[in-house]
Image (cartoon, helix red, strand yellow):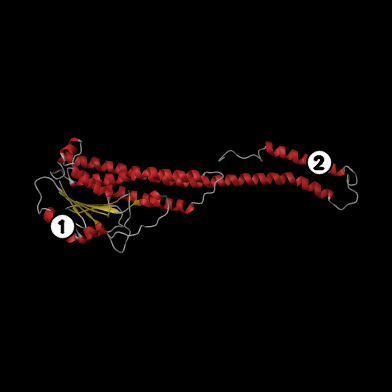
Amino acid sequence: MRIFRVLPSAATELDGLPTSLDAQGYIWIACGRREFELEQARIQSTLQSLAGTMLVDLHISDLLNNQLPSHYDYTSKYDVVVFRRLAAGQSETDLAHPGAVLTQSVRRGGPPVLRRIDTSPVGFAVFDRVLLTVHPAGCQVLEQYASRLLSSTAAASRVAGVHLPPSPADLMLRIVNQMVDGYLELRRELTRQLDHWQTELLQPKGRFSNWSSLLDARISLHQLDEICEDQRSAIQDWIESLATWEPNDTNGGQRGLELLKVRSRDVLEHIERVVHHVRRLEQNAETAVQMHFSAQSNRTNDIMRTLTALTAIFLPLNLIAGIFGMNFQFIPLLHQQTGFWWALGSMALTAVVLGVLFWRKRYLVRTSSGR
């Protein structure tokens, strides 16, 4: 296996590509989206020499489109997989200039970890003995994996158990699997941030004011859910396509084809784990909001119940005060020296009796939920 990386400062990497393939092995050509856009004529010529065919114009447009969702397509000579990554990095979102790197970061709300997730697509053109990858600028997954493969040629690395992928399809699946696992590494920070918001939402005496960030987080999680669904659909289409492959020397025969199917199902299982996690976070955020408003409603009900009980206590007192405030000449106790104290005592007794009654009925007691 030989690796060739097309870099902006070293476009002559293409000059070192052979015009024909050896009896065994394959070639991996890795390039950035901008480099692929500039060097597509030379890359097409190289593919014609190595694989006997070139990319069709529609697939070139797909590989250059940095807003394309994950999908799978094929021809009789090669397969194309576009896979949107979920990694920490800077997204390429310049629709006017495909492949161009933005000089300023896109402002997004929500948790910091969601603002750092890059969902730029990575394109794979899988030939029998050639793998072409088109990735966004600064794609650490491809850089790290290329370095790992280069180091695996050393004897010490082979002893450590690092083996080269036997085919371009196997290499593509390993890269995709590493991209999916990259999101699984970010889930702890994302879960910690949402748990912090849930704690703030359920504080009985606190006032949650970060509603815009929470709304942005819910929108971002919904977008991640859609991206993961596209990823799963693309891999499922790839697995269905593998069922039509015939065992040959390029894919390792029957054993190599079975290993491809096993690895493809493993990638699909990892994607389903991401989908499950994203949906669980969506449900947790929604549940936290509902519990927050439920707690606020209970608190309001407690306040209204207390105010209603106090109003009921003072209604008899207002009645007594209103009766003795009438402008009649003959009212019992009105002209007696102790009349004021009798009226005041009866009012106090009425207030105490009603207060004890309402306390026993728990009209004046705080509920224990949320406290």
**Residue 231 visible in the snapshot:** yes
C-alpha distance separating marks 1 and 2: 103 Å
- Horizontal side of residue 364 vs 92, given as left or right: right
Classify mark 1: helix, strand or loop.
Answer: helix
Look at discs 1 and 2 and give the one toward the viewer: 1
**Residue 287 visible in the snapshot:** no
Q: Residues within 10 Å of mark 1 (few under 14, many from 20)?
A: few
Classify mark 2: helix, strand or loop.
Answer: helix
Mark 1 or mark 2, earlier in chain: 1
Q: Extreme front residue here? A: 9
Q: Could you say where residue 25 lies in the image, as x and y percent from the top left? A: 13, 45
Q: Which residue is mark 2?
A: 346
- Horizontal side of residue 363 vs 133, given as left or right: right
- Horizontal side of residue 341 vs 203, given as left or right: right
- Horizontal side of residue 98 vs 115, given as left or right: left
Q: Extreme bottom residue here? A: 96
Q: Which residue is mark 1?
A: 12
Q: Could you say where residue 368 lies in the image, as x and y percent from the top left? A: 58, 38
The residue located at (83%, 43%) in the rendering is 343
Q: Are marks 1 and 2 in contact (CB under 8 Å)?
A: no
The residue located at (81%, 41%) in the rendering is 346
